[in-house]
Image (cartoon, helix red, strand yellow):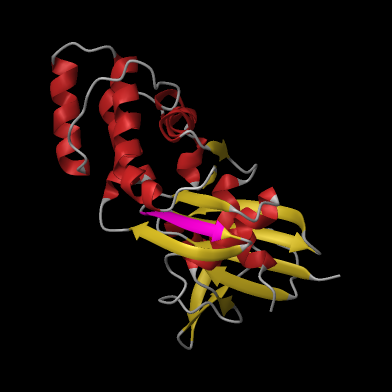
């Protein structure tokens, strides 16, 4: 029996997945700063992680991916690109071989065209926060609602023209002053994030979209993507841990 640990070193959170012979044993999420402060230390230039302190059983292999995979040089780990990790995780979780993978995390968004279980093409947006979880967090704060509540609204959206995270907040405040209903404003926010990813989706479109990352928990965005593209949207059970799962199932 082989026990594998995949660690997705994200900018906002660190996700850990432990699998035994392709069966998920543990899934954990840590704030990135907390993870580095409490569970890791530098030893001769390498980052050593106390897996036992994380509550992770002894593993036979360790694979890292994510935002900090190269800069941090995790001791004893094989490093694989984020694109590959997310592709492997999506295939493992859904069993699909032909789809478009949409991954939206805290700091970036990735779209991967998958054909016969292999990457055919991909696009990423890591230069603008307007198609990320951080954007949704900021807009939810402006509206005074939780992310869960924000994700309930997609009907009768207030038109928001700015696709810039910075200017978008100012525009949203202006719409609040105009007296628009919070639900309609929330729907407008969700449509704005869809418009930001729409050009990339259009280029790499498939009949099935597998939606992963923290933003995949936004129910409204799922509905918007389905209605606007006509595609079937599949959200894996462990959508937020998809990259860590993909790292763990990587064949050495």
The quadrant of the image that shows the N terminus is bottom right
Position of 24 with respect to 78 (left or right) is right
Would you say residue 109 sits in the magenta stretch? yes
Q: Residue at x 43, y 53 (%)?
A: 204
Total number of numbered discs in the rendering: 0
Q: Position of residue 196 (x, y in %)?
A: 29, 43
Position of 145 with respect to 99 (left or right) is left
Q: Position of residue 160 (x, y in %)?
A: 21, 28
Q: Residue at x 51, y 52 (%)?
A: 101
Q: Residue at x 62, y 44 (%)?
A: 236
Q: In the orientation shown, which residue stands out farthest toward the right? A: 1
Q: Is residue 61 above or below residue 246?
A: below
Q: Is residue 139 above or below residue 33?
A: above
Position of 9 with respect to 94 (left or right) is left
Q: Is residue 177 above or below residue 50?
A: above
What secondary structure is the magenta-colored segment mainly?
Answer: strand
Tell me where residue 77 sits by quadrant.
Answer: bottom right
Magenta range is 108-114
Pick the front one: 219 or 122: 122
């Amino acid at each position: 029996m082989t026990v594998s640990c995949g660690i997705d070193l994200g900018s906002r959170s660190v996700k850990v997945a432990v699998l035994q012979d392709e069966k998920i044993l543990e899934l954990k999420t840590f704030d990135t700063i907390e993870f580095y402060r409490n569970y890791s230390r530098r030893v001769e230039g390498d980052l050593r992680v106390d897996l036992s302190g994380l509550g992770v059983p002894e593993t036979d292999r360790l694979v890292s991916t994510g935002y900090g995979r190269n800069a941090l040089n995790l001791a004893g780990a094989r490093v694989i690109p984020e694109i590959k990790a997310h592709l492997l995780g999506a295939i493992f979780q859904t069993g699909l071989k032909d789809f478009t993978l949409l991954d939206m995390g805290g700091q970036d968004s990735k779209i991967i065209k998958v054909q016969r279980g292999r990457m055919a093409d991909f696009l990423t947006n890591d230069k603008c926060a307007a198609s990320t979880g951080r954007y949704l967090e900021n807009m939810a704060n402006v509206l005074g609602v939780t992310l869960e509540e924000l994700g309930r609204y997609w009907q009768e959206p207030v038109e928001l023209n700015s696709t810039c995270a910075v200017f978008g907040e100012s525009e949203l405040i202006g719409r609040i002053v105009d007296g628009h209903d919070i639900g309609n404003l929330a729907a407008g926010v969700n449509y704005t994030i869809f418009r930001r990813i729409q050009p990339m989706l259009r280029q790499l479109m498939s009949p099935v979209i597998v939606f992963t990352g923290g933003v995949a928990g936004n129910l409204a965005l799922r509905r918007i993507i389905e209605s606007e593209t006509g595609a079937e949207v599949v959200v894996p059970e462990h959508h937020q841990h998809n990259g860590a799962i993909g790292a763990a199932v990587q064949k050495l």
